[in-house]
Image: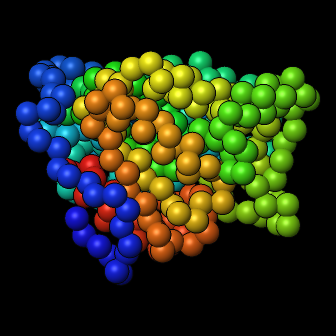
Amino acid sequence: MRDPGGMTLGEGLPTLPSNVRCERQMTDATFSDAVREIEATAAAERADPALDPRCVPFVLHHGRVTARAVVLFHGFTNCPRQFELLAQRIFESGANVYVPRLPRHGRSDKLTSELAGLTATELSAAALDAARLGGALGTALRVLGLSVGATVAAWLAQQRPIDLAVAVAPFFSVVRVPALLEPALAGALTLAPNLELWWDPRVKAAVGPPHAYPRFSTHALAQCLDLGAQVRAAAGQAAPQAARCVLVLNAKDPAIDNGAARAVWARWAEHGARCDTYTFENLDVRHDIIEPATYPAATTLVYPILLDLLAS
């Protein structure tokens, strides 16, 4: 594992033995169908004026099934553009890469109220569809998500026998809110009138990046918490179906409760699952440690670690 800039590491990350990889035999026809479907969806979305052309889903492929296929789930209020540079680097490492657009994200109108209608069911359906398409691109399917995208990746790890799930700052609990109180918080947010809150009230719509929404819906937030609650409940009952799950945290994350995320991994480990944790100790105080438009240091401090994880 590379250690850029003298980074302090968290728990060790042993290499996944080849005998526990979840591999599937794919045919060229299945691969071709998946690529055509993704590209057709992207073309239709680029032609839709209601959608931001920077935010359409995309696939990077080598013209054939590869040993690894990687699906990347973007964060809450962001869009596939968030992973453009990381996806390119993963592709250059030899993998096929698919970056879907999560439901109700990526609209041209950045002040849209569309996100208020988001449901946990829509997110889980999007996860399954992404696994269906991504699984046709490689013999081993690996997924990585950030924030709510990480919760989606964890949900998928619980439900499907994928090779690897990497969850970067998954959203199971709001910082300073005990996990036991999350159901009450989600319920209150659902019952109360929806609010559209600025990510940064000081600059409001001027907050970056330009392809993301500058505010979020409290009703959508409640649904994201609900998906996290589903993962927590399932983790208490059974091991994930994924062969390996890696939790990636920023020790200075100001948005999520790192302890709640660690608790999910601990429950999985109690069931005998292969679970590892990697903690960045020297990053800035920030939740989104992926987006290069707002955190250029991500390309040197974070990306090398994620590339190593996805290749191991």
* Picture layout, residue 118 above or below residue 97: above
**Residue ID at (45%, 26%):** 235
**Residue ID at (32%, 41%):** 275
Report which quarter residue 223 is drawn in: top right
* Picture layout, residue 215 above or below residue 152: below
Give residue 290's position: percent from left, percent from top.
Answer: 49, 59
Question: Quick one: 10 or 116, which is closer to the camera?
Answer: 10
**Residue ID at (16%, 33%):** 21
Question: Quick one: 302 or 188, which is closer to the camera?
Answer: 188
Give residue 228's position: percent from left, percent from top.
Answer: 58, 31
Extreme bottom residue here?
A: 5
Task: Count every numbered label the image shows and give the total.
Answer: 0
**Residue ID at (24%, 26%):** 136
Inspect this view and state whether residue 14 appears. Answer: yes
Q: In this figure, which colouring scheme has been used for the structure?
A: rainbow
Inspect this view and state whether residue 40 appears. Answer: no
- Quarter occupied by the N terminus: bottom left
Extreme front residue here?
A: 270
Extreme right residue here?
A: 193
* Picture layout, residue 275 above or below residue 175: above
Q: Please give left or right for residue 113 compared with residue 146 in the image.
A: right
Question: Quick one: 180 or 227, which is closer to the camera?
Answer: 180
Give residue 281's position: percent from left, percent from top.
Answer: 47, 69
Report which quarter residue 108 is drawn in: top right
Give residue 26's position: percent from left, percent from top.
Answer: 15, 23
